[in-house]
Image (cartoon, rainbow, N blue to C red):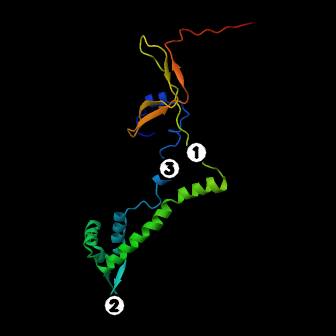
Amino acid sequence: MSGKAIDYKVILKRDGQTQYHRMPEWLPPHLIPIDGRSDDDLWAYVQKIAEEINFFDAGTLAASGNWKDFFAQNYASLQTLVDKKAVPPHLALLLSFLKLYNEPRHLINHITKRHLDFYYNEVLLLKKNPPVSDKAHVVFELKKNSGNTLLKKGSRLLAGKDDTKKELFYTLTHDIVVNPSKVTGMRSVFVD
């Protein structure tokens, strides 16, 4: 069970049919990328693997160390060299490869979404429904000693704020006359 507290007030306000709570937060495919490494992580990987690759001397053709000295800078200092346009050629070649690698990384990280889109759209031939706005039942109460009041179709009602602090509005779908009458009791008749 997650460590998040459940806000029961929100649950009790909902009728259970709104679209807000339908998608579980762990379900979107972009949350767990296949290759989630950043450029900094890739640079650290290059530094680690450079220690494992032998460097061969051109004159003797014998292994004489490894490649770690070529990639000794950290990624932040490398970015300052890029900003100054003073990157050594061997690092410029590697950086251009890493920059080009972003495209296949993006494609592989979105393969789950593309697979789901293909499955639902091409295999099952499902079509996306247009968005449906929320509906609410509203109870109006007049001030004391007020007469009948007409509320026109299209009148906007302020409904508070959503999770992103954006104000929510509902619009009346038809004209309504609000009057001071109240239901004082309900009865049923049983006929045998």
Q: Position of residue 177 (x, y in %)?
A: 52, 20
Q: Position of residue 147 (x, y in %)?
A: 46, 13
Identify residue for label 3.
Answer: 28
Front label number (1 vs 2): 1
Quarter holding the C terminus is top right
Q: Amino acid at mark 2?
A: Ala
Identify residue for label 2.
Answer: 58
Tag 3, which secondary structure?
A: loop
Q: Position of residue 145 (x, y in %)?
A: 42, 10
Res 128 visible: yes
Q: Amino acid at mark 3?
A: Pro
CB contact under 8 Å: marks 1 and 2: no
Vertical placement of residue 89 versus 37, above or below: below
Is tag 1's residue or tag 2's residue first in the polypeptide sequence? 2
User: Within 10 Å of the Cα at label 1, are there few (<14), some (14-19), or many (20+) other Cα atoms?
Assistant: few
Q: Nearer the viewer, residue 154 or 63?
A: 154
Q: Which mark is residue 60?
A: none
Tag 2, which secondary structure?
A: loop
Disc 2 and disc 3: Cα gap in Å?
A: 52 Å
Tag 1, which secondary structure?
A: loop
* Res 175 → quadrant: top right
CB contact under 8 Å: marks 1 and 3: no
Q: Position of residue 32 (x, y in %)?
A: 46, 54
Identify residue for label 1.
Answer: 130
Disc 1 and disc 3: Cα gap in Å?
A: 20 Å
Q: Nearer the viewer, residue 86 or 48?
A: 86
Residue drawn at point x = 47 percent, y = 54 percent: 30
21 sits to left or right of 95: right
